[in-house]
């Protein structure tokens, strides 16, 4: 049972464009939604995270939009750069799961120069 | 610098052999985790430990074993019972009771030859 569904599987964007990755979850007990960025051969690194009491969080060029009623959240990368090319994972967790992270399957983002 | 060290970076295993992947952290985190990453599958939880001398199975524990004798160390053994062990293995740690501060190692790529 996949509790966090992520789309698209891959994404190609031109430099300067907006990259949008979407995730949907099923477990209404989830209360923390982080996004991770992973470069080839490296471990994931936390990019940005949100709690369901806010609808949007912005950090630099990265924004999370959260829709609690639809059980969906998305990552927007503004002014995408070739250095943003990586795999992005959404995740979700809650205290009820001992804060174990449940991950989406990932999105391979390629930003063309 | 605090962080997580995984070794070796690359590991080759013959059919029928057990191999052990090392994970050491100096972040003073009580919780540690092992994830398996396959292309297009995201990260799946193998085992996790909230405290020394205690650990629980994750979603795909069959064919794996762990120990947690020290706070800093959480080695993973891939046994011969694991039928498809070729994958990228990631170790992580965090502070119990929170999903903040989840830190990943750089991974070990295991290949069966």
Image: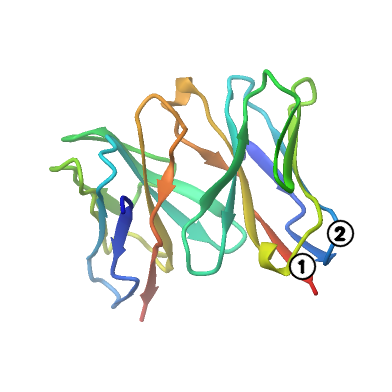
As drawn, A65 above or below B77: above
Q: Residues within 10 Å of mark 2 (few under 14, many from 20)?
A: some
Q: What is the chain identity of the residue bearing mark 2?
A: A
The quarter of the image holding the C terminus of chain B is bottom left
Residue A78, position as x, y percentages in the image: 80, 51
In terms of image quadrants, where is residue B87? bottom left
Judge by depth and name the residue closer to the eye, A27 or B98: B98
Q: Is residue B50 above or below residue B17?
A: above
Determine the image quadrant of residue A112. Answer: bottom right
Q: Position of residue B83 (x, y in %)?
A: 38, 63
- The quarter of the picture where the N terminus of chain B appears is bottom left
Q: CA distance from mark 1 to mark 2?
A: 9 Å
Left or right: A95 with respect to B73?
right
Say whether marks 1 and 2 touch (CB < 8 Å): yes
Q: Residue at x 75, y 64 (%)?
A: A81
Q: Residues within 10 Å of mark 1 (few under 14, many from 20)?
A: many
Who comes first in sequence, dot 1 or dot 2? 2
Whether residue A80 is visible, yes or no, is yes
Q: Against B65, is B13 above or below?
A: below
- Residue at figure coordinates x 18%, y 42% from the top left: B68
């Amino acid at each position: 049972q996949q509790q966090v569904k992520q789309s698209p599987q891959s994404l190609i964007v031109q430099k300067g464009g907006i990259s949008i990755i979407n995730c949907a979850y099923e477990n209404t007990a989830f209360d923390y939604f982080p996004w991770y960025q992973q470069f080839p051969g490296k471990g994931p690194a936390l990019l940005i995270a949100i709690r369901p009491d806010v609808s949007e969080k912005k950090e630099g060029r990265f924004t999370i939009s959260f829709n609690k009623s639809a059980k969906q959240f998305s990552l927007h990368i503004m002014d995408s750069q070739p250095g943003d090319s990586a795999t992005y994972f959404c995740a979700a967790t809650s205290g009820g799961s001992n804060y174990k992270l449940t991950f989406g399957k990932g999105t391979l983002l390629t930003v063309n120069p | 610098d605090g962080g997580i060290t995984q070794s070796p970076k690359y590991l080759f295993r013959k059919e029928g052999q057990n191999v052990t992947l090392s994970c050491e952290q100096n972040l003073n985190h009580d919780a540690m985790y092992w994830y398996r990453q396959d292309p297009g599958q995201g990260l799946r939880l193998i085992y996790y430990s909230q405290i020394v001398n205690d650990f629980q199975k994750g979603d795909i524990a069959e064919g794996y074993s762990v120990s947690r004798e020290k706070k800093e160390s959480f080695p993973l053994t891939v046994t011969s019972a694991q039928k498809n062990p070729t994958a990228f293995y990631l170790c992580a740690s965090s502070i119990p009771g929170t999903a903040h501060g989840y830190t990943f190692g750089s991974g070990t790529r295991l290949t069966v030859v």
